[in-house]
Image (spheres, rainbow, N blue to C red):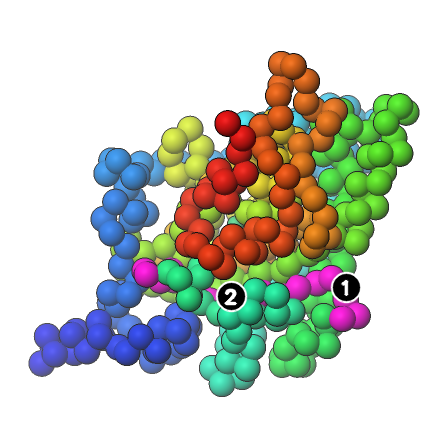
Amino acid sequence: MAVATETKEDDRPESQYQKGVKHLCENGVNKVPKKYILPASDRPRMNYDGKLNVRKQNLKLPVIDFSELQGANRPQVLKSLANACEQYGFFQLVNHGIPSDVISSMIDVSTRFFELPFEERAKYMSSDMHAPVRYGTSFNQNKDTVFCWRDFLKLMCHPPSDVLPHWPSSPGDLRKLAATYSKETKNLFLMVMEAILESLGLVGTTENKTKEEDILKDFQDGSQLMVVNCYPPCPEPNLTLGMPPHSDYGFLTLLLQDEVEGLQIQFQEKWVTVQPIANSFVVNVGDHLEIFSNGKYKSVLHRVSVNSKKSRTSVASLHTLPFKCTVRPSPKLIDEENPRRYKDTNFATFLEYISSCEPKRKNFLDSRKLG
Ligand code: OGA
Ligand code: NI
């Protein structure tokens, strides 16, 4: 009998997996179905060469105190910021000024969305990459051969008047809370981006001010995508991942995670877990910023591991230039010693790229490299 049950669990029809992990868990799982089992070399405790390659100790990312950026210490903080973007591609942002109730409400309403009956969530399922709202599972459920242990809700945030009416009408307070949250993160992104430009030596000098002010203006009208991630508890967390190794496409991602660990970044060839800090954001450099900085700032691979005890919620806010705007290495960062290292690109090209092939590791960025 036991054998029969196990076989049944492994052999659900493919369409069941398309409904997502939350749905799967609601129907009871005590084993990871085959659909989610990674080849041994891709499992969370191995590296690609088959060696155990996870650091036991959590990583304390560089911490940037946003309030200090606004004061007399700005020059020192800009140095720490530059160092974090060069060495880790990641930092934690504290004292960022976004009220804690805006943050806790966003996590709370995200959790409530995933607790809705499946039929309610399913209304927003779509395979259209341009849809203003998209509910789905895995990384790319139309392409992934092995699924990851994640469901998501993707909300396009710009321009608000066009997209907000498409956002889920249930839970009843989702639109209001998510709109406030997205506006706050957008403002924070603009201020952090200004500091990043300054850390690259691109603002603050009177000479080229107008040009760089232009890019900040472009960012105001830029694209913002909010990805709400739900990672249900997993009965066998060593066999699968919540998200496979990937880099983010934009300039910066502002990630809000609840108190449950899961995010891991690649650091000195090993996977290390990022220690969550309450009321902070994990900020990371995306592909577009790596290109814009001509390789000075690094878009680093990261992934999500799952656990058997707790459900985990995170909200990633991805920011870049307007959809069709060209991203290219800043001319001021190119000279004879530092020749141009990347081709021109834009967000539209990225979407085309991921619709046409499996987004693995850093394929997209690699495809933009010169030479
Ligand atoms: C992402 C991402 C990490 C997490 O959404 O791109 O990397 O912890 N999320 O959910
Ligand atoms: Ni990511």
The image shows residue 190 at horizontal and vertical percentages of 77, 45
As for residue 156 lying within the magenta part, the answer is yes
Q: Amino acid at mark 1?
A: Pro
Q: Which residue position is annotated with label 2? A: 152
Q: Is mark 2 within 8 Å of ligand 1?
A: yes
Q: Residue at x 73, y 40 (%)?
A: 193
Residue 33, compared with residue 48, is above or below; it is: below
For the record, the magenta segment spans 145-162
Q: Residue at x 26, y 68 (%)?
A: 33
Residue 11, compared with residue 343, is above or below; it is: below
Q: Tell me if 45 is positioned left or right of 303 in this view.
A: left
As for residue 275 lying within the magenta part, the answer is no
Of the 4 image quadrants, the one containing the N terminus is: bottom left
Give the mark nearer the N terminus: 1 vs 2: 2
Q: Residue at x 16, y 74 (%)?
A: 7
Residue 165, compared with residue 294, is above or below; it is: below
Query: Which label lies toward us, 1 or 2?
Result: 1
Task: In this rendered view, identify the residue nearer to me: 55 or 211.
Answer: 211
Task: In this rendered view, identify the residue nearer to me: 252 or 210.
Answer: 210
Q: Which residue position is annotated with label 1? A: 159
Q: Is mark 1 within 8 Å of ligand 1?
A: no
Tags 1 and 2 in contact by the CB under 8 Å rule? no
The image shows residue 24 at horizontal and vertical percentages of 35, 75
